[in-house]
Amino acid sequence: MGNINAVVTYETTDGGAIAIIAMDNPPVNALSHALRSGLVAAIEKARDSGAVKAVMLIGTARAFSAGADISEFGTPRQPPSLIDVIALLDAMAKPVIAAISGLALGGGFELALGCHYRVAAPGSRVGLPEVKLGLLPGAGGTQRLPRLVGAEVAAQIIVSGDPVPAAKALAMGALDAVLEGDFRAAALDFTREVMKAGGKPPRVRDRDDKLAAAKADPSVIDRAVAKQLQRLRGLPAPKACVDAVRAAVTMPFEEGQKKELALFMELLGSPESKAQRHVFFAEREAAKLPDMPADTKEKPIARAVVIGAGTMGGGIAMCFANAGIPVRVIETEQAALTRGLDRVAENYRIAISRGSLTQAEMDKRMAQISGTIDFGAVAEGDLVIEAVFEEMDLKRRVFTEIDRLAKPGALLASNTSTLDINQIAAVTKRPEDVLGMHFFSPANVMRLLEIVRARKTSFTALATALGIGRRIGKVTSVVGVCDGFVGNRMLARRTTQAEMLLLEGALPWDVDAAVLAFGFPMGPFAMGDLAGLDVGWRIRKARGVTAEISDTLCEAGRFGQKTGAGYYRYEKGSRTPMPDPEVEKIILAASEKRGITRRRIDAAEITERMIYPMINEGARILEERMAMRASDIDIIWIYGYGWPVWRGGPMFYADQVGLPQIRDRLAHYAATSPDKTLKPAPLLEKLAASGQGFADLPVQTIAV
């Protein structure tokens, strides 16, 4: 074996007849400049060798290649490009076999598509996820994949960006074989068979039999992705993906590849792609604590306990069961426990009906969940999560019992969405083991997990919470202790403005329409109806605060979808919100009672008042060191509240709009409103005056 460079090795076998080119660029064989350069040197060596009759290109067990090194985006491109590497493979007169184990994604899959044959280990996944970065495959993926699987199927794969399991990829025609047993040995045997068969290597670019249906009727491509495009609301990348696939059908390969590259470069400079790439990096940074010692070890978590079988408790239990972690759910009464476990089972049955889960998988997951009304079962948990009502006295009583019963060293977490973790930790004799793990509803669906760092929380506890977050598939962000933490604290500013807009002249459907147009999946009033207006009503009553319109609706028994009426009315069995004249009457009466002369409020003002106050609160959060990075706030809002990913999160969006404009508009609204929180935050003022943005702020530690 010889090293071509630090990440590519070259060796021969079978008397020199087979060259094995191996990629090893940890952790996932990103196609960096070093890897591309090494591949070119190795391919040319195999091409020019008189002894070599076939080539096998292989990665590591974890990844053939997970794609481009996106840290190189926006920097001058150093040759060779990935297109150059693939062109060399494609033009080889000797057969080249891509041996895929683990992941072959993005540029990694395009590399495999440039080979003459593709084989994979069971459990491998292939795909072209570039659309999730606001891009399209730019190294021939949109031209070669349609020639293997058909234009309609290729368009669906590329527009979704989702990986395809090896068995499905084989059935589609993207792979030539899935090989059992020792994969390297099996792939070599496949290479030997190809070598013995002889003949001219089949180039994917020359195939057109799978394009026949789309050539006969080009509209089949549009029909295949119509639902996907509708859901993606006209974003440029999905549409460009379809245009590129269409080029594979209507143009010769070389022209189609030029069209693909032109579309790629256009998208690379788009604001949507810049935002999505920001999110990609921000997600990976969010779980890093700048002050955590490098040698901090996680505690092993073999079993979890969840206290409370309500909607949140059941959803949290599902998170653990889905990850194969046994979980015990504790309730005070058998009836409540039975209802909670029945709700979990029903959630799984719904997943089966949608085709996203099999009965066998449901049975396996349900077997991980057990329930009890014996509070002593707390002692079983390596991790204990409290998910009871959002009342401080209740939570403190529960934690007193948890402290008494939990095993030494167990991680103790509260799912509180607003309350002071320091006060909760203070009732225990082990505050170093206590923190917040704020799941978002529905917990089994929403990807965000806010980890709340209390004053005495140890680094071991934080590392363990971050580790368990990864195991259960959550995007984690560590935040500080303040009312509402990061997400709900910012949401409160939007909620206040939403109520004020109704009093001043807007109606719920006006506000929701503006927020939908901005890119959120739901407006605040439709979302309130979905969550249940009684939840906020109960919290407000406990705090002695009011929200006149929402309180009036709740007093009338209008709690949202669950009662068939809230801000909207709902037909029996329907979740579709319908404007309700009764709500309009309630709003008009509230305005009159306050002595407010109603006026027409346009969508631009509604949007600013829904978004800018949240940005302002985000600035205060950063000032107070309740978040480590502006990008952490972005991640929280994208994965916890449905902020449109193509807008990059509230703080990224603020930088794009320009902080002087945000500052000036907030000052305008503050001058005409009794809401003093609208006054621009000092940090916002400072950054706007200096010409800086939130992205210019350094990483900071959480204040404890």
Image (cartoon, rainbow, N blue to C red):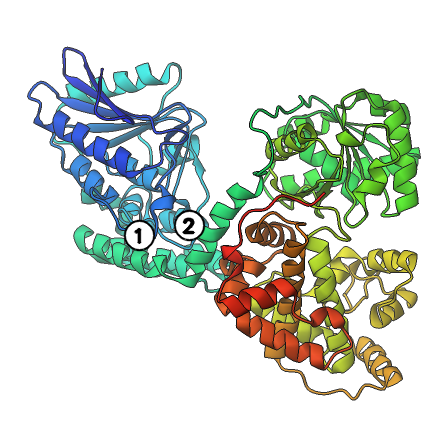
Residue 619 screen position, x and y as percent: 63, 60
Name the residue located 91 percent from the left edge and 56 percent from the top edge.
Answer: 542
Q: Residue at x 51, y 66 (%)?
A: 690
Camera-nearest residue between 163 and 226: 163
> From where the camera sits, is residue 362 visible?
no
Q: Is residue 14 left or right of residue 25?
A: left
**Category of crowding for the residue at label 2, using alpha-carbon neighbours closer than 10 angstroms: few (below 14), some (14–19), many (at least 20):** many
Identify the image quadrant of residue 572: bottom right
Residue that mark 2 sits on:
156
Residue 465 appears anywhere in the view: yes
Distance from Cα at disc 2 to Cα at disc 1: 15 Å
Q: Residue at x 14, y 37 (%)?
A: 91
Q: Is residue 585 above or below residue 373?
A: below
Residue identifier under label 1:
213
- In front: label 2 or label 1: 2
Element class at badge 2? helix
674 relative to 694 in the view: left or right: right
Q: Quadrant of residue 677?
A: bottom right
Report the label total: 2
The amino acid type found where label 2 is placed reads Gln
Q: Earlier in the sequence, mark 2 or mark 1?
A: 2
Q: Position of residue 625 (x, y in %)?
A: 66, 50
Q: Is residue 644 above or below residue 103?
A: below
In the picture, the quarter occupied by the C terminus is top right
Could you tell me which quadrant the N terminus lies in? Answer: top left
